[in-house]
Image: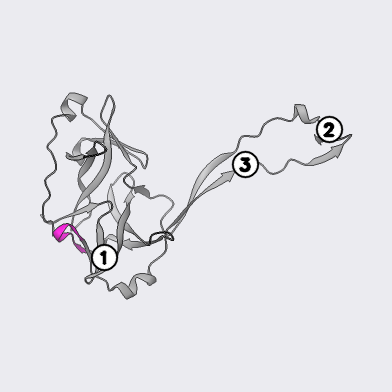
């Protein structure tokens, strides 16, 4: 079975030309199928491009190789993510006797309006889940690391295994089968193992996936 090892931060090449690093992975909810990869390029002014997973030809030599020329990267959608405040805007204010009144209520009596913050994105479906290296991996009792790699089948692009990193200065990577995943969201992935069982997971060994 051919597999692709998609590691966050890995260099991406289009026909041998460097075009950025893997920043994020787009996943279909419930099915856990990879639909797109998001490649980020640039230092101060970063530009992120959404590419279909079918554009990935292989992950040989610890690189992610694309089957499209770098000149065609501009034809794919740009990914942007921003936080937008959502709140009511139908309050009418007027000044009276040196203070602000809202519907004849003095300023001290004006209720505080809750403002929700939502993410708005371009380039991907609103229903899609986006995973990256900030996604936390938890066992039944506690956090055990952060997502590092996603190993997918090269034919149907379903998630086979997850690799999470433990530690800060000299992190180690460990592999967990998607079979043990109970819950998956952008913020966290929960696995159905105790802490003691999670401590027995195998350390990740780099393989040349094609």
- Height in image: 2 above or below 148? below
Instruction: Provide residue 98's location: percent of width, then percent of height.
Output: 86, 35
Mark before the other along the chain sequence, 1 or 2: 1
Instruction: Provide residue 81's location: percent of width, then percent of height.
Output: 46, 53
Q: Give the residue drawn at x 22%, y 51%.
A: 158
Please name whichever residue, 169 or 162, is drawn nearer the observer in this view of the structure. Answer: 169
**Which quadrant would residue 108 be assigned to in this image?**
top right
Magenta residues, start to end: 57-63
* Residue farthest front in this picture: 169
Please name whichever residue, 1 or 76, is drawn nearer the observer in this view of the structure. Answer: 76
Drawn side of residue 209 relative to residue 166, left or right? left
- Crowding at dot 1, Cα within 10 Å, few <14 / some 14-19 / many 20+, comes out as some
Residue holding disc 2: 104
Drawn side of residue 40 relative to residue 93, left or right? left
Residue holding disc 1: 55
Q: Give the residue drawn at x 59%, y 43%.
A: 86
Please name whichever residue, 162 or 204, is drawn nearer the observer in this view of the structure. Answer: 204
**Which quadrant would residue 51 be assigned to in this image?**
bottom left
Instruction: Provide residue 10's location: percent of width, then percent of height.
Output: 25, 55
CA gap between label 3 and label 2 equals 21 Å
Mark before the other along the chain sequence, 1 or 3: 1
Residue 29 is covered by the magenta coloring: no
Please name whichever residue, 200 or 169, is drawn nearer the observer in this view of the structure. Answer: 169
* Residue 87's disc number: 3
């Amino acid at each position: 079975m051919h597999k692709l090892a998609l590691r966050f931060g890995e260099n991406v090449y289009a026909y041998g030309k460097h075009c950025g690093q893997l920043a994020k992975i787009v996943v279909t909810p419930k099915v856990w199928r990879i639909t797109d990869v998001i490649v980020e390029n640039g230092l101060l002014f970063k530009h992120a491009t959404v590419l279909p997973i079918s554009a990935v030809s292989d992950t040989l030599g610890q690189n992610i190789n694309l089957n499209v020329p770098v000149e065609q990267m501009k034809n794919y959608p740009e990914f942007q993510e921003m936080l937008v405040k959502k709140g009511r805007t139908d309050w009418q204010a007027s000044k009276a006797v040196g203070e602000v009144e809202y519907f004849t209520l003095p300023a001290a009596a004006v209720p505080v309006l809750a403002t929700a913050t939502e993410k708005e994105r371009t380039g991907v479906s609103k229903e899609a889940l986006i995973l990256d290296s900030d996604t936390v991996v938890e066992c039944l009792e506690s956090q055990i690391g952060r997502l590092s790699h996603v190993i997918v089948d090269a034919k149907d692009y379903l998630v086979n295994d997850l690799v999470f990193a433990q530690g800060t200065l000299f992190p180690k990577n460990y592999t967990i089968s998607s079979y043990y995943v109970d819950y998956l969201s952008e913020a966290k992935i929960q696995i159905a193992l105790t802490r003691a069982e999670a401590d027995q997971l195998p350390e990740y060994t780099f393989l040349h996936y094609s």
